Image: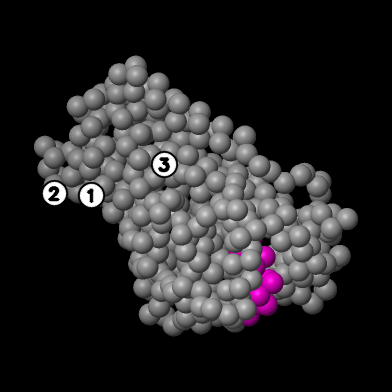
């Protein structure tokens, strides 16, 4: 048992160390005013588009915590939980807990549907960023949430019997199991989950492919495939991403990007994604997620054991208390958002620096960053609180400052 706890501790330490010891971009200090790079008309448009989204985002975060807390801490919520457990039976704690967890997680997402519809459908459509209809939006919502419900229920289905059979060792065993499951998702996601959202095909021959190959040859890193995705059936946004591990590693370019950008600009976007690969960002993110899974398992174990000592529940694996664990995970997730955003911003800034190093073309980089911000209606200088809470990329002003200083 001590060995298992030691391995769990090493996983947490490795996940944190991977974020501390990593390539980073230099700290350039405060970004210059957005007016240096963008005209007043665009800044007004970006503010009108983004300010309501910030407000809706705050409400969505509040609901993410309040709904599970209501399920766990109010009389009506506990009544629903009791009826669910009674319907399944106390002798099947894993199944009963899985049902409770799935219902609470689903209810949390359903409570936020009006917000998601306003942001992702109405608001995006009003600003010309959406190209799909209501049916397409509804399909995306379902495939974006139902797998999470199933995963949460699966964790409860396995975790509750594990906690009964291994009352002292289950946090380590369960946390390590969840970490392994997440690594499997990262590996298999490109071939199992991504096809639910996007149809992809190899980048065809032509000037863009030639530039992409030139960047690939100069980067000295390997990806299994360069693909184009049919993002235009959903949005006008231009983007790209790196996904997968090992044999499933791939760079996916939105068709809106390939069709709307010069070969040099597409090559620079690819160089940014190759910077993520060179810096092992997907592996680092998977290690951090594994550390988070292990730490969460220990936090939940500490909570349930304390409640047993206080006489609030009979055993650590009482299925009637499953909603409380969902609430605890929700609180931990929201509380960790600033740290997650900081880790992501550091990785994105380092990838920007890698793109400049790989292409040696700061002028294209500067023009691309300004244009992408306009096309995607990005807020070039978000409010400080929003930046700290959930801003996963450096704002456009910081990215432009990096390009200008690199040129000098």
Q: Is residue 355 left or right of residue 408?
A: left
Label 3, label 1: how far apart the Cα atoms are: 17 Å
Q: Mark 3 — residue?
A: 329
Classify mark 1: helix, strand or loop.
helix
Identify which residue, 97 or 204, lies in the foreground: 204
- Give the spatial CA distance, label 2 vs label 3: 25 Å
Residue at 50 percent of width and 35 percent of height: 15
Picture coordinates of residue 58 (x, y %)?
A: 57, 56
As drawn, 406 above or below 253: above
Ranked by sequence position, the earlier of labels 1 and 2 is 2
- Identify the residue at horizontal 13%, vertical 40% (top origin): 92
Name the residue: 56% across, 59% down: 57
Give how far across and how far down residue 376 sits, in percent.
64, 72
Neighbours of disc 2 within 10 Å: few (<14), some (14-19), many (20+)? few
The front one of 1 and 190 is 190
- In the rendered image, the vertical position of residue 192 relative to residue 284, given as above or below: below
| Mark 2 or mark 3, earlier in chain | 2
Residues at badges 1 and 2 in contact (C-beta under 8 Å)?
yes
Indicate the colouring scheme.
Answer: one colour
Q: Which residue is mark 2?
A: 87
In the rendered image, which quarter contains the C terminus? Answer: bottom right
Q: Is residue 222 left or right of residue 192?
A: right
Q: What stretch of residues is rendered in magenta?
A: 260-271
First-in-chain label (3 vs 1)? 1
Q: Quadrant of residue 21?
A: top right
Q: Give the class, few, some or many, for how many residues have Cα within 10 Å of label 3's Cα (few <14, many ≥20).
A: some
Secondary element type, mark 3? helix
**Label 1 – label 2 distance at C-alpha:** 10 Å
Dominant SS type (magenta)? helix
- Figure check: 170 above or below 57: above
Q: Are marks 2 and 3 in contact (CB under 8 Å)?
A: no
Q: Which mark is residue 99?
A: 1
């Amino acid at each position: 048992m001590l060995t298992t706890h030691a391995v769990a501790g090493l996983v947490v330490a490795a996940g944190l160390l991977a974020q501390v010891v990593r390539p980073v971009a230099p700290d350039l200090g405060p970004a210059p005013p957005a007016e240096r790079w963008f005209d007043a008309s665009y800044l007004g448009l970006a503010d009108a588009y983004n300010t309501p989204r910030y407000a809706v985002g705050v409400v969505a975060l509040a609901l993410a915590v309040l709904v599970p807390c209501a399920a766990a801490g109010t009389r009506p919520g506990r009544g629903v939980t009791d009826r669910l457990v009674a319907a399944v039976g106390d002798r099947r704690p894993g199944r009963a807990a899985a049902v409770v967890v799935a219902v609470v997680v689903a209810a949390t997402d359903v409570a936020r549907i009006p917000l998601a519809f306003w942001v992702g459908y109405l608001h995006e459509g009003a600003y010309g960023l959406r190209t799909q209809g209501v049916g397409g939006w509804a399909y995306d919502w379902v495939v974006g949430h139902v797998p999470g419900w199933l995963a949460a229920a699966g964790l409860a289905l396995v975790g509750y019997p594990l906690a009964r059979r291994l009352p002292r060792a289950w946090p380590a065993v369960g946390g390590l199991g969840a970490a392994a499951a997440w690594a499997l998702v990262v590996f298999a996601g490109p071939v199992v989950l991504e096809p639910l959202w996007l149809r992809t095909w190899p980048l065809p021959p032509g000037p863009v492919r030639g530039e992409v190959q030139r960047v690939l040859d100069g980067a000295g890193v390997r990806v299994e495939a360069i693909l184009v995705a049919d993002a235009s059936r959903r949005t006008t946004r231009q983007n790209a991403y790196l996904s997968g591990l090992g044999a499933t590693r791939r760079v996916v370019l939105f068709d809106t990007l390939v069709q709307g950008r010069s070969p040099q600009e597409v090559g620079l976007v690819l160089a940014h994604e190759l910077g993520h690969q060179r810096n092992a960002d997907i592996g680092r993110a998977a290690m951090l997620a594994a550390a988070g899974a292990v730490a969460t398992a220990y936090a939940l174990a500490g909570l349930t054991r304390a409640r047993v000592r206080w006489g609030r529940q009979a055993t650590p694996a009482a299925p009637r208390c499953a909603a409380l664990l969902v609430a605890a995970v929700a609180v931990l997730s929201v509380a960790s958002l600033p740290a997650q955003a900081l880790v992501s911003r550091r990785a994105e800034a380092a990838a920007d620096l890698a793109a400049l190093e790989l292409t040696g073309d700061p002028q294209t980089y500067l023009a691309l960053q300004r244009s992408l911000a306009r096309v995607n209606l990005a807020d070039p200088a978000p409010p400080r609180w929003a930046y700290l809470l959930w801003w996963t990329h450096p704002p456009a002003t910081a990215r432009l400052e990096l390009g200008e200083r690199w040129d000098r």
